[in-house]
Image: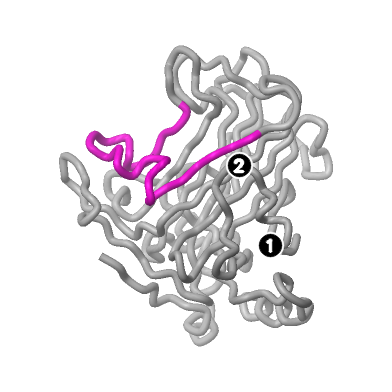
Amino acid sequence: MKYSLLFAVVALVGLPGVARAHWDAGTVWFVVQFPDGATPTIDGNHGDWDGVPSSYGIDNSVFNDARGLIPEGWTHADWDVTDFNMFHRIGWSDTENKLYLATQVFDDEHNMDRTSHWSEDDSWEVSFTMNHDAVVSVEEGGYTDISDATIGINSRYNFSVPVHPTLGDYFWMRPGDLTGTEWLWPGTDWIEFNYTWDGDEFGESTYYYEMSIKPIGSYPLGLDGYQPDDLDVWDLEEGEIVHISLVMIDNDGSDNSYRTPGCCGYWSTLDNCCSSVNDWVLAGPDAAFTTSVEADSWGRIKARFQ
């Protein structure tokens, strides 16, 4: 089934205060629209993103310590880019009705020594929802955790690469961890994923993650397994808002429990994990792909959300 989002930019303009109802009030990021015939090939090579203006990207400066792991008094001015440095971009296609994500991360040590859970190693986590009712107001806490009550309207895609040599895993998703959902795992039309790296695979390196996903709006609850016809797929449209949150885990060395202060970095675009609350606007065609960009046009759009 396919649905259109009803909560568009024009609706935000007409409803005072609504734009400030979600996590980190007033913060809105933009999803670049790829022209027909120019959507990224999901191969872990970010060359397809070279024409995307840097204004669409987000970096270390917007990420928060989600597990209380950093020393007291630490600020973003103390960020050590020789230890960990990241840059994220999100795109979309009207014709393909897909979202595209590209993350570039430098790490002085790419960790792969977990004994059980994927999050004990370096990982890339993407959570999203197309349902605005899943995002509560800042006054109520600013986000909603994925739980049995909300699993049907939130999706999580988590990667820890390469494939673990003994556990044999690299990917985990909600609700794809349930049985019978292999048909929507990476390598299908529902989700494509790939990565490459420069440098030492398990040492100092830069990893390039890339993914495309269909905008699943909801999953039915209470089923033993899902089939494609059970899913609601939203129809992406220019000017609409989607909720996407990103988490990067930086685990160095053998002390890799992300619940241990001082062990690592657990960086999130909100103040926690596992939720989809940040506001991203599906941008219209950008002249930067062909001719030039009207610099003040983005200023006018952003001003609507202040």
Q: Quadrant of residue 45?
A: top right
**What's the residue type where badge 1 is placed?**
Tyr
Q: Position of residue 106 (x, y in %)?
A: 73, 35
The outermost residue toward the bottom is 14
* Secondary structure of the residue carrying numbered label 2: loop
First of labels 1, 2 by sequence position: 2
| Magenta span of residues | 170-196
Q: Residues within 10 Å of mark 2 (few under 14, many from 20)?
A: many
* Secondary structure of the residue carrying numbered label 1: helix
Q: Which residue is mark 2?
A: 44
Quadrant where the C terminus is found in the figure: bottom right
* Residue 189 sits inside the magenta stretch: yes
Quadrant where the N terminus is found in the figure: bottom left
Q: Position of residue 23 (x, y in %)?
A: 54, 59
Q: Position of residue 74 (x, y in %)?
A: 77, 38
- Disc 1 and disc 2 in contact, CB within 8 angstroms: no
Gap in Å between the C-alphas at discs 1 and 2?
19 Å
Residue sitting at x 27%, y 44%: 148
Q: Which residue is mark 1?
A: 56
Q: Is residue 42 rendered to the left or right of residue 188?
A: right
Residue sitting at x 77%, y 81%: 294
Nearest the viewer among 154 and 38 is: 38
Residue sitting at x 50%, y 34%: 159
Give the number of the mark in front: 1 or 2: 2
